[in-house]
Amino acid sequence: MIRFNHDNFLMFPELELGQWLAAIAEEEGYTIEEVEYNFVGADKMLLLNQEYLNHDVHTDIITFDYTETKALRAEVYISYSALKKNAKLNSQTIENEFLRLLSHAILHCLGYNDKSNDQKQHMRSKEDDCINLFHVKH
């Protein structure tokens, strides 16, 4: 089950997004048991960073990964303001940046990391693959 908690924020139908996210997981041999996407403001994102990660910064996404088997379980928080800022900064459409963040969370749950420069490059490549997959199918 995939849930999207938002205030008329989604740019694509939930069913299409869910099918796409499930396909990403399936390519890696996983299923999605429960992933919840929460779209929040900058203040809430800062509080989450401070409370759970001891970071005093505003980020675009936080993924709490509860996966213990091949069935993904996670709680994801996405900052709409950071999403818009990053889209502009990276010369991306808001739609593609939106897809990048959704897939980024799933990729973390699948074991991909972005701590080192090499990991960041690999993660970005995987995100690009995911975005392309969405556009091919939808």
Image (tube, rainbow, N blue to C red):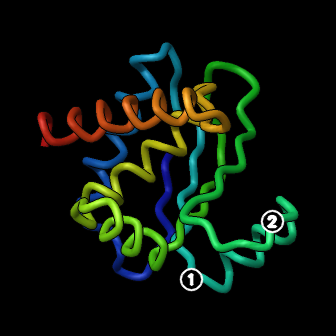
Q: Circle 2 is placed at which residue position?
A: 55
Q: Position of residue 130 (x, y in %)?
A: 32, 35
Q: Give residue 106's position: percent from left, percent from top.
A: 52, 38
Q: Where is residue 93 shown, x and y percent of the image? A: 22, 63
Quadrant, the C terminus: top left
Mark 1: few/some/many CA within 10 Å (<14, 14-19, 20+): some
Q: Tell me the amino acid under the disc marked 2.
A: His
Q: Residue furthest bottom?
A: 43
Name the residue located 54 percent from the left edge and 64 percent from the top edge: 60
Q: Residue at x 59, y 82 (%)?
A: 42
Q: Residue at the top extreme?
A: 29
In the image, which disc is placed on residue 65? none
Q: Disc 1 on helix, strand or loop?
A: loop
- Counting the numbered discs, the total is 2
In which quadrant of the rendered view does residue 48 lie? bottom right
In the rendered image, which quarter is residue 9 located in? bottom left
- The one nearer the camera, 106 or 118, is 118
Rendered location of residue 96, percent (x, y): 26, 55
Amino acid carrying mark 1 in the image: Gly
User: Which residue lies under the disc numbered 1?
Assistant: 41
